[in-house]
Amino acid sequence: MAKTATVYARVEPEVKERAEAILDEIGVPVSVVIGMLYRQIIRKNGIPLDLSLPVERPKSIHEMTKEEFDAGMEQSFKDLDAGRYVTLEEMEAEFRRDFGV
C-alpha cells in the first residue's frame, strides 16, 4: 500500500530533539515509528506502549575490558549449553507479530 497520508503533531522542541536523538541512535526514522505505533494501536485496540531504551544501555564491545568481554562470552556459552537462546527465525517472527510488518 502506498504511503500517502500525512500526520502533523505539535510537541515541545526539547521532547522532539531528545526523542529524535534516540531514534537516530537506534537507526529508525520517525515515520517508521509512527507507522509502528499506529499498527500496534490497531492490533491492541488501544494504546500499546513500552517501547524504550534501557536506562543504562549495554556497553559496546569497544567499551568493555577484556575481563568483561570474557565473562560475557563465558555466560553466552553457558546459556547456549543450557538451551537458553532464540533463533533468528523466532526473533523475526516475534518482530513481525509485535509490529505488524
Image (tube, rainbow, N blue to C red):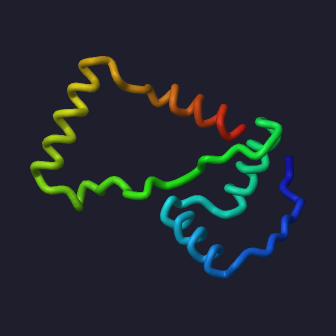
Q: Is residue 26 left or right of residue 37?
A: left
At horizontal 65% and vertical 74% (from top left) the residue drawn is 16
34 or 5, which lies in front?
Answer: 34
| Residue 21 placement: quadrant | bottom right
Q: Is residue 88 left or right of residue 94?
A: left
In the rendered image, the vertical position of residue 12 relative to residue 94, given as above or below: below
Give coordinates of residue 32: x percent, y percent: 69, 56
| Residue 94 placement: quadrant | top right
Q: Residue furthest bottom?
A: 13
Count the labels in the image: 0
In the rendered image, the vertical position of residue 4 relative to residue 78, given as above or below: below
Q: Tell me the quadrant of the picture where the C terminus can be found.
A: top right
Q: Is residue 101 visible?
A: no
At horizontal 73% and vertical 50% (from top left) the residue drawn is 37
Give coordinates of residue 11: x percent, y percent: 74, 75
64 or 52, which lies in front?
Answer: 52
Give coordinates of residue 35: x percent, y percent: 75, 52
| Residue 9 placement: quadrant | bottom right
Q: Is residue 98 left or right of residue 25?
A: right
At horizontal 17% and vertical 47% (from top left) the residue drawn is 69
Q: Residue furthest top?
A: 82
Q: Residue furthest right?
A: 5
Q: Is residue 81 visible?
A: yes
In the rendered image, the vertical position of residue 91 relative to residue 31, given as above or below: above
Q: Is residue 33 left or right of residue 74?
A: right
In the rendered image, the vertical position of residue 11 relative to residue 68, given as above or below: below
At horizontal 16% and vertical 34% (from top left) the residue drawn is 74
Give coordinates of residue 54: x percent, y percent: 44, 53
